[in-house]
Image (cartoon, coloured by chain):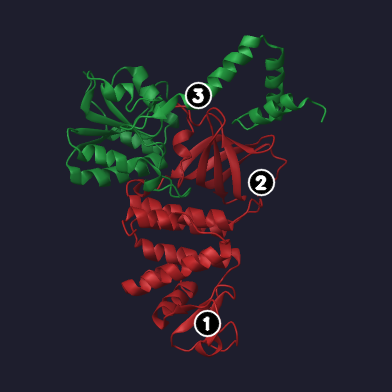
Amino acid sequence: MLLPESIQSLINALERLPGIGPKSASRLAFYLLRATDDVADDLALALANLKKNTAFCEECFNITEAGRERCEICESTRRDGSVICVVEEALDVLALERTGGFQGKYHVLQGVLSPIEGIGPDDLKIKQLIARVARGGVQEVILATNPSMEGDATALYLRQQLEPLGVRVTRLARGLPMGGDLEYADQNTLLRALSGRQEMS
Amino acid sequence: MPEPKFRSFRVDAVVLRHSDYGEADRLLTLFTRQLGKTRAIAKGARKIASRKAGHIEPFTYVKLQLAQGRDMFIVTQADTVDAYLPLRDDLVLTGHAAYALELLDRFTYDDQTENPTLFRLLTDTLSRLASRHDPWLVIRYYEMRLLDHVGFRPQLFECVNCGRAIQPEDQFFSFSAGGVICPRCGQGLKHLHNVSVETLKYLRHFQRSSYAEAARARPSPEVQKEAESLMQGYFTYLLERELNTPGFLRKIVGRD
């Protein structure tokens, strides 16, 4: 082995990250080796705390600080508990929060149904959502899964499961994106954009 | 068939599956008329204003312009031929379509040879499902034809052991021998599966008939169940592992 063991093991660890190949991994490792001590220390501390200090909210399964039972949004009294927005991943909550347009609460499924990959309802936080809605106080469930085959399948399944509970089930609208181009739109999007057209006000 | 010397060429394709790749790209597994099964990268397909994203969802029959990248094809243009929209509005249909795609994906290799018959079978099957033909029938017919194309056509007319013509009575089926074994040869043999005379009749019918003729079949629920589990057992044996979609379908329709 040409490299000292400690450098090689860092390279090996970095290589396991998505999108990082052997060359990038060695470049990062050597950067850290030459950088000031605090760069490496900060990174080490952040990595060590990453798993230790995070947990899943027991109510909505979003990521939260360790030691809390429920996340900030679920605890908040200013948020409307009668509307639940169902998303695939915690990152989707972040995207919706950035808009500032939603005042209800969330439910993170932690994945999406996929027949071909064999991901079924039991692999997601679906039972927990049903139980949460069945406890009452919920008027509307907004299905905000991605507009893809898997996202649509998940939304169809959730509607089927939520129907007997008598809540209003809605799906995010589908249409033309900002900066898009009609000419390149697919039939599916264009059809839905047409059927969901709105009065100009 | 497009020669690799062309830097860019058109293919007709059905998207079998997709997965995220890199920052905003998608890696597609395609079944094409011109190249058989192949993979391609759709750059930027996860961006919200992508011009390709809507055209390259699974189940979509699409015309693609592919460019030879460094180690994989790159999608440069995409235009939907048929999106089979009804398949997306019904969970059971989604499941059946996914089953058809999964079988094809498992049985084919990235061998860069044209395969117009298999491609035609796939698009026909998807459009039959989308026009709400009986999924059981569409799928059993598809399975039989697929086995023909990939070289696992089961022998349903002669005993695979003694070669004598099969008589109209209950038989055995051997996964390893790939066909029916008559009751006399099957005595005492291990790893055989029962197949009733009624079920065998339908399997034989599907094997030698056109879809139009096969579509007139009206088998009883027991026969449907037996044929389905026999075929799935045979697939599990051939592929040496369980398929994902049958379990998914069972959960969706609440049989589990």
**What residue is drawn where x is 52% and y is 68%?**
B234
Q: Secondary structure at mark 2?
A: loop
Q: Disc number at residue B86?
A: none
The x and y percentages for residue A64 are 39, 25
Q: Disc number at residue A50?
A: 3
Image side of residue B34 versus residue B131, left or right: right
Q: Which chain did the image draw in red?
A: B
> Comparing marks 2 and 3, which lies closer to the viewer?
3
Task: Mark yes or no: residue B219 visible.
Answer: no
| Residue for badge 1 | B157
Q: Which chain did the image draw in green?
A: A
Q: Dot 2: few (<14), some (14–19), or many (≥20) neighbours within 10 Å?
A: some
Q: Is residue A93 placed above or below B12 in the rendered structure?
A: above
Q: Does label 2 or label 1 sit earlier along the sequence? A: 2
Chain identifier of the residue bearing label 2 in the image = B
Q: Secondary structure at mark 3?
A: helix
Q: Real-space Cα distance between discs 3 and 1? A: 64 Å
The residue closer to the viewer here, A158 or B50, is A158
Q: Residue furthest right?
A: A2
| Residue for badge 2 | B2
* Amino acid type at mark 3: Leu
Image side of residue A74 versus residue B239, left or right: left
Q: Is residue A62 placed above or below B223 in the rendered structure?
A: above
Q: Real-space Cα distance between discs 2 and 1? A: 40 Å
- Which quarter of the figure has residue B124? bottom left
Chain identifier of the residue bearing label 3 in the image = A
> Comparing marks 3 and 1, which lies closer to the viewer?
3
The x and y percentages for residue B133 are 34, 60
* Amino acid type at mark 1: Phe
- Looking at the rendering, in which quadrant would you find the C terminus of chain A? top left
Q: Residue furthest front?
A: A67
